[in-house]
Image (cartoon, rainbow, N blue to C red):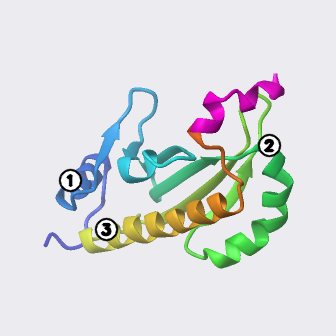
Amino acid sequence: MLGVVNADAERVKQWLQQANIRHYICEHCHGLHLSELQERDGVVDARVFVEEDGILLTTELELRPSALFAVQAELTRLNMAYPSIKLFLDVSDDSLPRLVACDLLLSRHGVSFEQFIYFVQATVDATVQLLDEGQEYHWLIWPDEMDSGAGEALH
């Protein structure tokens, strides 16, 4: 065990490998993409970023435009139901609405391997539960819906 260390991107990458958490680095951002979440239907991005004050794990879920008001109405309840993650909506003109789930592990004064792995697993578990709820309430867009031309009405 290494004890408490100041984790940089290389250390986080090593820890993910050590814990057998599949991940990859894309050429478009400096985040480590978590394959376990990234490969799930409804997930646009699931990434770990090493920032100055901590380690940020964020997952973006693509919402049906027709579910936007329902999700907005449920946002307070969702934030209370999933206290380990912060949930908010990201709505822009150039993409479908997204529900963003994120968590921050404060690490300015160091973090241990055990703390980091617990943080990742707890955040992934909460996000998977959120995905299941999103599927149950039909909030999320699934790949087969995009292939059928469901999104054409937007343009």
Mark found first going from the N terminus, 1 or 3:
1
Q: Which amino acid does label 1 sit on?
A: Gln
Q: In this view, does 60 lie to the left or right of 12?
A: right
Q: Disc 2 on helix, strand or loop?
A: helix
Give percent across and percent down for residue 52: 45, 53
Circles 3, 2 touching at the beta carbon (< 8 Å)? no
Q: Residues within 10 Å of mark 3 (few under 14, many from 20)?
A: some
- For the question of whether residue 50 can be seen, the reply is no
Q: What residue type is labelled 3?
A: Ile
Q: Give the range drawn in magenta.
A: 144-155
Give percent across and percent down for residue 124: 44, 63
- Residue furthest to the left in view is 1
Q: Disc 3 on helix, strand or loop?
A: helix
Give percent across and percent down for residue 57: 47, 56
| Residue placed most toward the observer, 134 or 56 | 134
Residue 117: give its label. 3
Query: Is 47 rendered above or below residue 105?
Result: above
- Report which residue position mark 1 lands on: 17
Q: Disc 1 on helix, strand or loop?
A: helix
Q: Which residue is drawn at 85% across and 64% down?
A: 73
Residue 71: give its label. none
Q: Which residue is drawn at 57% across and 68% down?
A: 85
Q: Which quadrant holds the C terminus?
A: top right
Q: Is 37 included in the stretch rendered in magenta?
A: no
Q: In this view, does 144 lie to the left or right of 46?
A: right
- Residue 107 figure quarter: bottom left
- Report which residue position mark 2 lands on: 65
Q: Which amino acid does label 2 sit on?
A: Pro
Front: mark 2 or 1: 2
